[in-house]
Image (cartoon, grey):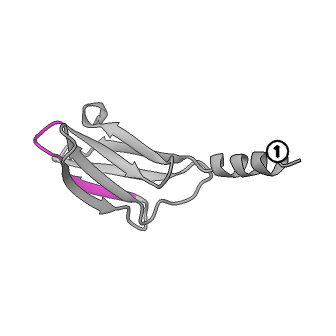
Amino acid sequence: MTLVPLLACAATAAAHNAICDCFDNGDDTITCEGGFSDGGKATGVPLRVLDGAGKVLLEGKMSDNSDFTFAKPKVDFRVEFDAGQGHVVTIDGRDIEE
């Protein structure tokens, strides 16, 4: 009998996966757009840019439009969109295209 409530909680937790995509604007800036699979906005969700060693180069939060634009780092980097437990999206800077 306790299995049914647990399954319901699992379905609810999985109902809104984090989504983030980044693109190179062609002007030495990168824009990342985020949201959730249920259509929810990512306003205020933290976004970090880290170098290859994991050092934070910059951090900010998604705007009211669920986006964040930053100067393209001169070093190898990755982006982390951190919407909380189990909802972290990591994007390698080498995978970001114009």
- The x, y position of residue 77, in whole percent, is 21, 40
Is residue 97 magenta-colored? no
Extreme residue in the top direction: 94
Residue at position x 25%, y 46% in the image = 25
| Location of the C terminus (image quadrant) | top left
Left or right, 33 with reference to 1: left
- Label 1 neighbour load within 10 Å: few <14, some 14-19, many 20+: few
- The x, y position of residue 65, in whole percent, is 43, 63
Amino acid of disc 1: Leu
Nearest the viewer among 38 and 1 is 1
Left or right, 30 with reference to 5: left
Secondary structure of residue under mark 1: helix
Extreme residue in the right direction: 1
Q: How many numbered circles are shown?
A: 1
Residue at position x 64%, y 50% in the image = 13
- The x, y position of residue 61, in whole percent, is 34, 63
Residues shaded magenta: 67-76
Nearest the viewer among 57 and 32 is 57
Extreme residue in the left direction: 74
- The x, y position of residue 6, in whole percent, is 76, 48
Q: Quadrant of residue 76?
A: top left
Is residue 69 magenta-colored? yes
Task: Please give the residue where the numbered disc 1 appears in the rendered image.
Answer: 3
Residue at position x 72%, y 52% in the image = 9
Left or right, 45 with reference to 52: right
Above or below: residue 62 compared with residue 71 = below
